[in-house]
Image (spheres, helix red, strand yellow):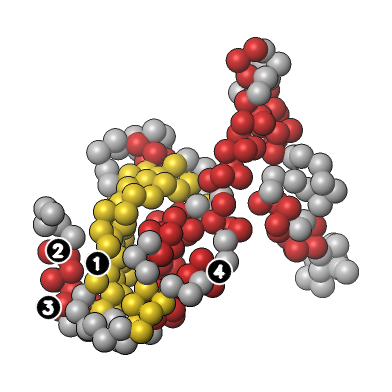
């Protein structure tokens, strides 16, 4: 099919050129490994020899690493939560704080990492404690920007529990800022997503923000 505006063949969509699950598996649609070949080419382009002893296994290691660090693409939210939502008449704030996470910035494929703090006010339903860190991990194990990851965590919890409110605060240290570009090693990023009573009620919001900073 031609692009009517240019008369040139229309660009194929990702879905037409690749199987998405295959991409996340580090393979192309023909089943051939392509991550390793790409890493070898990068090594050559930066002036290295991919066949020297210290680098021979680097392409396969990086292929395995990216599969691990992008495992969040292969997790279904519904299967993750499963049957871990329970009816409970508890209507006070629930907070899980200091959840460590590691992710990859989608702009430079460099790591960013830090802590995530999550709270919700139940509306007849609670979620199993371990599921909140798992939700954070699922979204962090993708190519990300911190702003989007913060919102995704809040939206999933809000949709799953229909609570009176959800709050998510993420602290992030980005190596793409510390190692390259402006090279500001002390810079940290804070993002938040507030829903329901956390957004509407300043007292509830301030209680959450104060509790995630208090020592245990």
- Residue 95 horizontal/vertical position (percent): 24, 67
- Are circles 3 and 1 on residues that touch, CB within 8 Å? no
* The label number, if any, that marks residue 79 in the structure image: 4
Q: Kindly check if marks 1 and 2 are in contact, taking CB atoms under 8 A apart as contact.
A: yes
Residue position marked by numbered label 1 in the rendering: 95
Mark 3 residue crowding within 10 angstroms, few (<14) / some (14–19) / many (20+) = few
Give the mark nearer the N terminus: 3 vs 1.
Answer: 1
SS category of the residue bearing label 1 = strand
Neighbourhood count class around disc 2 (C-alpha, 10 Å): few under 14, some 14–19, many 20 upward: few
**Nearer the viewer's eye, disc 4 or disc 2?**
4
Q: Which of 30 and 119 is in front in this view?
A: 119
Secondary structure of residue under mark 3: helix
- Nearest to N terminus: mark 3 or mark 4: 4
Q: Do the residues labelled 4 and 2 touch (CB within 8 Å)?
A: no
Which of the labelled discs sits on residue 203, or is there none? 3
Secondary-structure class at tag 2:
helix
Pointer 2 and pointer 3: residues touching (CB < 8 Å)?
no
Please indicate, yes or no, whether residue 149 appears anywhere in the rendered image.
no
Local crowd size for mark 4, using a 10 Å CA cut-off: few (<14), some (14–19), many (≥20):
few
User: Residue 193: x and y, percent?
Assistant: 32, 70
In the rendered image, which residue does mark 2 sit on? 211
Looking at the rendered image, the disc whose residue lies closer to the viewer, 3 or 1, is: 1
How far apart are the alpha carbons under marks 4 and 2? 31 Å
């Amino acid at each position: 099919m031609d692009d009517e505006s240019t008369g040139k063949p229309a660009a194929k969509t990702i879905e037409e050129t690749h199987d998405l699950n295959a991409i996340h598996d580090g393979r192309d649609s023909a089943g051939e490994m392509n991550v390793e070949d790409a890493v070898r080419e990068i090594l050559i382009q930066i002036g290295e020899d991919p066949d020297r002893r210290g680098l021979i296994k680097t392409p396969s290691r990086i292929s395995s690493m990216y599969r691990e660090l992008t495992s969040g693409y292969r997790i279904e939210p519904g299967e993750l939560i499963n049957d871990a939502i329970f009816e409970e008449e508890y209507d006070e704030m629930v907070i899980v704080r200091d959840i460590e996470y590691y992710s990859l910035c989608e702009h430079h494929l460099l790591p960013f990492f830090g802590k995530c703090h999550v709270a919700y006010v139940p509306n007849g339903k609670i979620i199993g404690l371990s599921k909140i860190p798992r939700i954070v991990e699922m979204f962090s194990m993708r190519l990300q920007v911190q702003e989007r990851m913060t919102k995704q965590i809040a939206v999933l919890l809000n949709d799953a529990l229909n609570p009176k409110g959800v709050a998510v605060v993420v602290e992030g240290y980005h190596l793409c800022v510390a190692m390259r570009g402006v090279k500001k090693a002390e810079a940290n990023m804070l993002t938040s997503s507030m829903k329901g009573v956390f957004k509407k009620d300043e007292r509830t919001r301030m209680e959450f923000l104060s509790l995630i900073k208090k020592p245990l």
